[in-house]
Amino acid sequence: MILLTGFEPFGGDSSNSSWGAVLEAQEILRGEGHTVEVLELPCVFGESAAVLREAMGKLQPELTICVGLAGGRDRLSLERVAINCDDARIPDNAGNRPIDEPVVPEGPAAYFSTLPVKSALRALQIAGIRAEVSQTAGTYVCNHVFYALMHELGGADTPRARGGFIHVPHDETRLPQGSTVPGMATRDMGRGIAVVVRTALGTTVDAKLSAGAVH
């Protein structure tokens, strides 16, 4: 069982490309015979994590990948680390704006993704899909969900349970004409997520290749 999640629109936008990308990935992966469930999370601190935990408890997925929008990025970002910090620059969809608050009180400072991010990066590059390993998932609801996911998996009874987070660009078809904001076709985002899923299912030891950042 594979669980993929995206987000509802936020920040005044009418859509969220993460949800469209997840639906595309579901279609691709189901066509290959995989059992895939998708879930649209609310862009709300606390509630988003609770909805995710409930779904994980019900479905018991062996692989969970959460997906969110990173406006301004031009490629898929395979997030390496989630930090135990909510620090909202803008309010969430319920008007909450936590500042310097932990995602999980008394939780560890950070969790690393258990996805094979380096192997996935290489597979995405071979597939011709723009991608990177990202060192920060921000401090908004995306990071909140990423941390909650990894915290939940940290207490999982089964060592097969793996998870992580991917940021995607804007859907290029929904950007205003003449916009300089980077985007990507939803189909390509879905293809990319499917590549990451296949890589995670087939990789036990991550590749050793450089994908770090100087700053």
Image (spheres, rainbow, N blue to C red):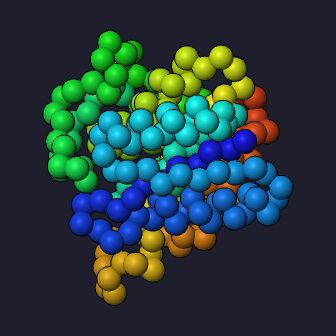
Q: Does residue 98 appear anywhere in the picture? A: yes
Instruction: Name above or below for residue 84 compared with residue 8.
Output: above
Q: Which residue is drawn at 26% across and 33% down?
A: 86
Q: In this view, does 97 lie to the left or right of 14?
A: left
**Near-viewer residue (165 or 38):** 38
Q: Is residue 93 left or right of residue 72?
A: left
Q: Is residue 167 left or right of residue 98?
A: right
Instruction: Name above or below for residue 195 compared with residue 61.
Output: below
Q: Does residue 211 appear anywhere in the picture? A: no
Name the quadrant of the C terminus.
Answer: top left
Name the quadrant of the N terminus.
Answer: top right
Q: Which residue is drawn at 30% across and 17% down?
A: 105
Can you give x and y, in whole percent of width and height, for residue 134 in the image? 45, 42
**Near-viewer residue (88 or 54):** 54
User: Residue pushed farthest bottom?
Assistant: 177
Q: Residue at x 48, y 39 (%)?
A: 52
Can you give x and y, in whole percent of width and height, for residue 131 in the image? 54, 54
Instruction: Name above or below for residue 104 compared with residue 115.
Output: above
Can you give x and y, in whole percent of width and height, for residue 167 in the image? 46, 51
Q: Residue at x 34, y 87 (%)?
A: 177
